[in-house]
Image (cartoon, helix red, strand yellow):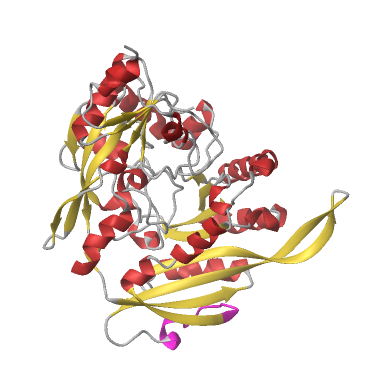
Amino acid sequence: MDWTAELASAVAGQVRTDHALVDKFATDFGRVVEKRPMAVVRPSSAEDVANAVKFAGSHSLRIAARGAGHSQNSQSLSDDIVLDMRGLDRVLHIDEDRPCATCQGGITWRALLAQLLPLGLSPPVLTNNLDVTVGGTLSTAGLGVASWRKGSQADHVSALEVVTGTGDIVRCSPDSGKDLFDAVRAGLGQFGVITGATITLRKHQPKVRTFYLLYDDLGSLLNDLKSLTQRERFDCLESWCVPLPQGLKKTGGDRRPFAEWFFPLHVTAEFDGAAPEAAEKLRDLHFYKHVHTEDWETPEFYTRLDPLFELWKRGGFWDYAHPWMECILPWDAAAFYIQQVLQNFPPQALAGGHMLLWPARGSASSVPLFVRPEGDAVMGFGILPAVPQSLLGQVLPMMEKASQAAMLVGGKRYLSGWLPFTKDQWKAHYGTLWLTVEQLKEQYDPLRVFGELG
């Protein structure tokens, strides 16, 4: 009996080895790395996850947890065993008084919201893409348009159920098992699999108003963003960089496309009753143009990007490679760094993608392994292209150069993207936390069932 048959006898859930199914788990949303697993396990319980992890450890195999597979650097891939967590997709309890929700780790944020919205409840932070899983985003921190003051999704978890690399099922919180609780939040799945979470909720207002602003000057935008992060004028801040192609110019002897860059900013405020007025909300801001005002029902606002994602899917961009590079910059270095990137970035490379800006208070998050620069304010910056496989060889060096430049100016990578880090680069990323990371790895995954960084 080969080990895949032995594994099937160790878990109650499905164990699949057929080529058609396994091939679907050989790559992730990044489509840069391929690892074809020998078996895909769809656990039916945390006990199934624990048994699969124990089996992997006893057979010197590697195992990876996979929700929606939205990683870009093979975090959800394995040559041996992949755990398809999507079967653990139930909401176990909703407490409207606290308020909080306890759910399994494989549920998507969209499915969780479907049960919360009729109660007027929602998580404080939501990712733009709601079809990713709770366990997946908590493992990377999880950011959204409210993160500027409310931190990451991992900041709003009060308890977790985790299967460690030794196959133990542990329930942890800030008051019990805090070291594991802090390790798995933004821990990239290196210390355990999140099989359940209790998420703090909030009562939201029924409507929101979004002001669509356009800036033609990066400095003016950054000054306004810093001012907005110091106040409570808006609930959500969302900005990005948009190229206006200007044609071709000579660069290094060749004629290459170039663009003038503009900067949309969407600022959103919740309300119940009278809608907030532009004159009051937009005072003292230095935008080039107030383009539009849009009112939404709050649930509609949460799904506002669904039509964009659908267009990318219909256009084939969703099936391209996504070597995303997201970083968090010291505020004082942000303007210089972003200007350099924009001057050298080919505008045509953003077809089917975008270039994000997200400001934040430096104190917004307290998740230990969500590493970021120090300071009262920081600037998130992301290059999120969709790249045909035929052009990947040209684009990857460009993305790596942008990543290294961010670190040279004191930035830190946000760890959901493409991360071709060496061991030394991982050490540099974590800095004084590296020894803690090594100690946690030895404690919770001594057999390296979940692999190793670098």
Q: Position of residue 266 (x, y in %)?
A: 48, 72
Q: Is residue 446 visible?
A: no
Question: How many numbered marks are there?
Answer: 0
Q: Is residue 173 above or below residue 22?
A: below
Q: Is residue 267 above or below residue 421?
A: below
Q: Quadrant of residue 146?
A: bottom left
Q: Residue at x 37, y 75 (%)?
A: 269
In the rendered structure, the answer to whether residue 397 lies left or right of residue 292 reads right
The segment highlighted magenta reads 278-289
Q: Residue at x 61, y 56 (%)?
A: 338
Q: Position of residue 67 (x, y in %)?
A: 36, 42
Q: Is residue 146 above or below residue 220?
A: above
Judging depth in this view, the residue of 336 and 206 nearest the camera is 206
Q: Is residue 13 visible?
A: yes
In the rendered structure, the answer to whether residue 53 lies left or right of residue 173 reads right
Q: Residue at x 55, y 56 (%)?
A: 332
Check residue 121 for magenta coloring: no
Check residue 282 for magenta coloring: yes
Q: Is residue 339 above or below residue 402?
A: below
